[in-house]
Amino acid sequence: MSTAEVDTSVIRSKPYNIPSTSHTTSDRKTDFFINFLGSCEPQLLRYLANFEIFGSDEASLRGIARDPAWTGEKRRGLIRDILAITGEAPEMHVRILDNQLDKFFS
């Protein structure tokens, strides 16, 4: 092995979180939403497709969670729009997701 080549098998065998080259941006975005929706009580994984269809990503949700302009009804209105993409948007789920934005990005 030349000095320009690096044996990554040693690194990958350690508990480091090194993304595989086959792990696409789309996969990482899906993983983020699985973590976000799965950490809700109750889990709201049924809305995974809604967030993907809407074009949401981690950076936009983080911005919405931290920006004081996105408070109260404005934020819940956006959540309602996202949930309504594939059907109804139960108010309880809207409130859970609104709360989860604060908890997840605190």
Image (cartoon, rainbow, N blue to C red):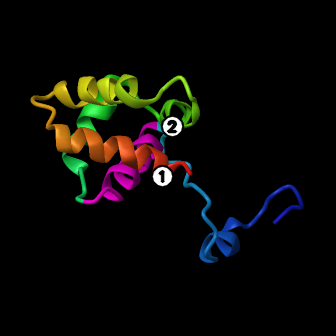
Q: Quadrant of residue 9?
A: bottom right
Q: Quadrant of residue 63?
A: top right
Residue at the limit of the structure toward the left, as seen here: 87
Residue at image coords 50%, 38%: 58
Vertical relation: 2 (above or below) 79: below
* Residue 101, horizontal then vertical, whole percent: 44, 44
Image quadrant containing the N terminus: bottom right
Our reading of the magenta stretch's main secondary structure is: helix
Q: Nearer the viewer, residue 96 or 86?
A: 96
Q: Amino acid at mark 2?
A: Ala
Q: Amino acid at mark 1?
A: Phe
Secondary structure of the residue carrying numbered label 2: helix
Instruction: Please name the residue that numbered disc 2 is placed on.
Output: 65
Residue at image coords 21%, 43%: 93
**Is residue 7 magenta-colored?**
no
Which numbered dot is residue 104?
A: 1
**Is residue 40 magenta-colored?**
yes
Residue at image coords 48%, 41%: 24
Residue at image coords 35%, 26%: 73
Secondary structure of the residue carrying numbered label 1: helix
Q: Mark 1 near mark 2, Cβ–Cβ under 8 Å?
A: yes
State the extent of the magenta-drawn residues as a range. Answer: 26-41
> Which badge, 1 or 2, is on the more N-terminal residue?
2
